[in-house]
Amino acid sequence: MIELWYTTFGTAALPPAVLAAYLGLLPPAWQQRVLACRRPARQQAALFGALLLQHALRSQERSYSLDSVRRTPDNRPYLAGAELDFNVAHSGAYVVCALSTTCRVGVDIEQHTRTNIAGFRPHFRPAEWNALSTTDLPDAFYRLWTQKEAVAKADGRGLNIPLRDIRIRQQRAELAGQCWHLQEICLPDAAAYTLHVAANYPLSVGPPRRVSFEEPRPA
Amino acid sequence: MSTLTEQLKNQIIQELNLVDINPADVNPDAPLFDYDGLGLDSIDALELTVILSKHYGIKVTDPAKMKQAFFSLNTLADFITEHQAAAVAA
């Protein structure tokens, strides 16, 4: 089974004392990464993404530390020396983390903030673009987008993969001869978001688990 | 910051609705897609191609080939300048 956790956060900058208290929960290298973020919304996503990943890793039978997380040359995070794979995504006020001990996973969530998507058309195959129901736009676009993005993130090359190379057929995708299985997940109270998980094995995704990170007391 | 870079910065902030950015704080050499730069994500890469098409008449069908041009505001401005110079020479 693929496990899925999520949390929500605000987009305004946190008061310095609150930010410092949350940062105290993370290893120093991850604190620096959060502090280096220039945009408050991006900083919140980085902070709660790290906290959520830490929660997911600690929940495993053998607890892992964020200090064991490395990055591939394409910047995909992975856990050194562990038989598990994970992926984190954020959009709007949500951050999600998928984890599997048996297969490779990718996750993407997207808030429906765009109403005019016509300009994106050249990046998709004519057949897949034409298949988007005109009465269901832009929701149908976000389904297609998060499917492709979840596969690109599971593969690990992300933005370096031409979108047209990822072929979506129902709840499956094919990229360079590799088959990926897709599952759409609906988060409670997140009607304006679309979320997909991709995996290289037909595993089901468990019920999404909400994690609330209470504001820690300053030291 | 060149006029083109300044113009690009304002177009990106406006069209990607980056409400939490003070334009004066944007470093034109900072990575567009890294957390310590503008922190853009992959769907924003599609938005950049729309900006290139709409404002500069440059058609990009594959953002995957734009890695170098999409590195920073300055590399994107250089890409536009080179593209425009090539179009004039043709």
Image: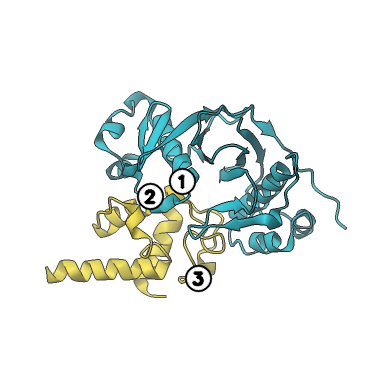
Q: CA distance from mark 3 to mark 1?
A: 31 Å
Residue at mark 1: chain:
A
Q: Could you tell me if the residues under marks 2 and 1 are in contact, i.e. CB atoms within 8 Å?
A: yes
Q: Which chain's colour is yellow? A: B
Query: Horizontal placement of B89 versus A62: left or right?
Result: left
Q: Label 2 belongs to which residue?
A: A161
User: Residue B70: x, y in percent?
Assistant: 39, 62
Could you tell me which residue is drawn at 30 percent across and 28 percent down?
A131
Whole-angstrom CA distance, mark 2 to mark 1, is: 9 Å
Q: Which mark is residue A155?
A: 1
Kindly identify which chain the residue marked by label 2 belongs to: A
For label 2, count other residues whose C-alpha is less than 10 Å away and answer few (under 14), some (14-19) or many (20+).
Answer: many
Under mark 2, the amino acid is Ile
Q: Residues within 10 Å of mark 1 (few under 14, many from 20)?
A: many
Give the foreground label among 3 and 2: 2
Disc marking residue B27: 3
The amino acid beneath tag 1 is: Asp
Q: CA distance from mark 3 to mark 2?
A: 28 Å
Residue lying at the far bottom in this picture: please name it: B1
Q: Are marks 2 and 1 on the same chain?
A: yes
Q: Residue at x 70, y 42 (%)?
A: A56
